[in-house]
């Protein structure tokens, strides 16, 4: 179990705002589920935000249940409210500690859900998650076998990450320039994804 967060000014996601902390990852799994540990972790970041005199806490969630995105209902229990959305399913939720603070928003690129490459698949990712790089290697094998063109772009810094079209930040998979999904997949699942959405 762990929680990872950072100042909004240097977050590796396309979010704009000032003086907030952003939750990048909250993970409680296996035998640790159902013990209230997620609540404890949220309590820790709230205390830390208060100590740092931050205006609040931000998290990217989803309008429906999605892998690698924490359920919005969980955050609602702590008073988080949706302040912005981005296609096709992202929500930006905020817990304000300073009610007068200006709410953060998704960037224009995130709202458009696009990337520069309009030819084939594009994978834009960062090393924030240790599983992403191996996942992309597996997915590009599938694309090679099916003769799809693709490009892989590794983000080098938070400034680049703040310009991308995927609010998830850690991974964006695009087809012909349009955001498709943020989800790392097995080869088998990706083949089903292709047959449903592309082929």
Image (cartoon, rainbow, N blue to C red):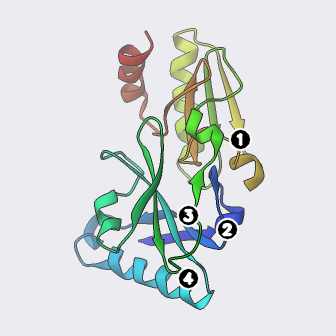
Q: Which residue does the image show at 48% across and 61% down from the upper left?
A: 59
Find disc 2 in the rendering and name its residue: 18
Q: Earlier in the sequence, mark 1 or mark 2?
A: 2
Find disc 4 in the rendering and name its residue: 49
Q: Residues within 10 Å of mark 1 (few under 14, many from 20)?
A: some
In the image, residue 120 lies at what x, y percent? 61, 15
Q: CA distance from mark 1 to mark 2?
A: 26 Å
Q: Earlier in the sequence, mark 2 or mark 3?
A: 2
Camera-side residue: 96 or 124?
96
Quadrant of the rendered image containing residue 22: bottom right
Q: How many marks?
A: 4
Q: CA distance from mark 2 to mark 3?
A: 9 Å
Q: Residues within 10 Å of mark 4 (few under 14, many from 20)?
A: some
Q: Earlier in the sequence, mark 4 or mark 3?
A: 4
Checking the image for residue 164, the label placed there is none
Camera-side residue: 169 or 57?
57
Checking the image for residue 103, the label placed there is 3
Q: Which residue does the image show at 41% across and 78% down from the upper left?
A: 41
Q: In the rendered structure, are the residues bearing label 1 and label 2 in contact, judged by CB atoms less than 8 Å apart?
A: no
Q: CA distance from mark 2 to mark 4?
A: 13 Å
Relative height, residue 123 to residue 10 (above, below): above
Residue at disc 4, secondary structure: helix
Q: Nearer the viewer, mark 2 or mark 3?
A: 3
Q: Nearer the viewer, mark 2 or mark 4?
A: 2
Q: In the rendered structure, are the residues bearing label 4 and label 1 in contact, judged by CB atoms less than 8 Å apart?
A: no
In the image, residue 118 lies at what x, y percent? 66, 17
In the image, residue 47 lies at what x, y percent? 49, 88
Q: CA distance from mark 4 to mark 1?
A: 30 Å
Q: Earlier in the sequence, mark 2 or mark 4?
A: 2
Q: Nearer the viewer, mark 3 or mark 1?
A: 3
In the image, residue 110 lies at what x, y percent? 59, 41
Find disc 1 in the rendering and name its residue: 154
């Amino acid at each position: 179990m762990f929680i990872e967060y950072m100042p909004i000014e240097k977050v590796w996601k396309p979010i704009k705002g000032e003086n907030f902390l952003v939750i990048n990852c909250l993970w409680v799994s296996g035998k640790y589920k159902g013990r209230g540990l997620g609540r404890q972790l949220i309590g820790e970041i709230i205390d830390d935000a208060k100590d740092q005199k931050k205006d609040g806490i931000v998290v990217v969630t989803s309008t429906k249940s999605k892998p690698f995105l924490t359920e919005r209902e969980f955050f609602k229990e702590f008073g988080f409210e949706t302040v912005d959305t981005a296609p096709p399913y992202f929500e930006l939720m905020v817990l304000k500690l300073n009610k007068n603070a200006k709410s953060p928003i998704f960037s224009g690129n995130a709202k458009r859900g696009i990337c520069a490459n309009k030819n084939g698949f594009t994978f834009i990712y960062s090393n924030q998650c240790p599983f992403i790089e191996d996942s992309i290697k597996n997915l590009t094998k599938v694309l090679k076998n099916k003769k799809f063109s693709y490009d892989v772009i590794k983000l080098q810094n938070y400034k680049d990450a703040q310009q991308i079209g995927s609010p998830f930040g850690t991974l964006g998979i695009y087809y012909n320039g349009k955001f498709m999904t943020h989800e790392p997949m097995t080869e088998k699942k990706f083949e089903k994804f292709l047959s449903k959405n592309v082929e």
